[in-house]
Image: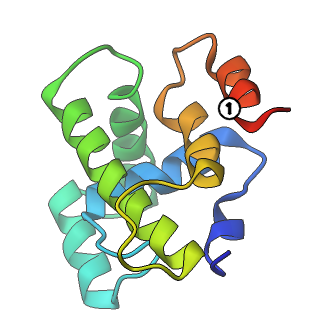
């Protein structure tokens, strides 16, 4: 596994989701990697000027996952797939990989599908747990 994957294993799901949504808002190309300039440009694009506006913006972005279908939610899912394929490539050291590994998918299903009541059971089924 790549060194960045354990960084995402945070027991408090709201924090986990906040990081993931922040990366989406930053339009991050690589998992957990951006320069200072990219960070500042992304914060400006998201309307984040200080910690309070950052909390407010993350809360509104978090609602995109739970408020039902929307264009922004569709964009998040598209971005998440590309982001997680890169994570899978890094974790397996196979740059030609075109899918998300089971281990990474199981980590992110609860984050991306918080309203689905069977997500835990489905993850257990897929992992054989």
Circle 1: element type? helix
Q: How is the image coloured?
A: rainbow
Left/right placement of residue 33 relative to residue 126 reads left
Q: Quadrant of residue 77?
A: top left
How busy is the neighbourhood of tag 1: few (under 14 within 10 Å), some, or many (20 plus)? few
Q: Residue at x 64, y 60 (%)?
A: 8
Left/right placement of residue 42 relative to residue 83 reads left
Q: Residue at x 40, y 55 (%)?
A: 99
* Rendered view: 70 above or below 86: above
Where is residue 125 drawn, in percent x and y?
A: 73, 25
Q: Quadrant of the N terminus?
A: bottom right
Q: Quadrant of residue 35?
A: bottom left
* Rendered view: 97 above or below 94: above
- In this view, the residue in front, 29 or 129, is 129
Mark 1 lies on residue: 126
Where is residue 57 drawn, in percent x and y?
A: 34, 45
Q: Quadrant of the C terminus?
A: top right
Residue sticking out furthest to the right? 129
Q: Residue at x 63, y 41 (%)?
A: 106
- In this view, the residue in front, 40 or 118, is 118
Where is residue 12 drawn, in percent x and y?
A: 74, 44
Q: Residue at x 62, y 21 (%)?
A: 119
Left/right placement of residue 119 relative to residue 99 reads right
Q: Quadrant of residue 51?
A: bottom left
Where is residue 20 drawn, in percent x and y?
A: 47, 53
């Amino acid at each position: 596994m790549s060194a960045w994957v354990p960084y995402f294993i945070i027991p408090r799901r709201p924090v986990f989701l906040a990081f993931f949504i922040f990366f989406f808002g930053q339009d991050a190309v690589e998992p957990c990697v951006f320069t200072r300039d990219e960070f500042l440009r992304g914060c400006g694009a998201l309307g984040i000027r200080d910690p309070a506006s950052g909390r407010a913006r993350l809360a509104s972005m978090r609602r995109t996952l739970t408020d039902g279908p929307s264009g922004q939610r569709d964009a998040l899912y598209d971005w998440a797939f590309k982001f997680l394929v890169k994570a899978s490539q890094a974790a397996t050291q196979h740059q030609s990989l075109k899918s998300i590994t089971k281990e990474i998918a199981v980590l992110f299903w609860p984050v991306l599908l918080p309203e689905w009541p069977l997500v835990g059971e489905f993850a257990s089924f897929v992992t054989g747990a």
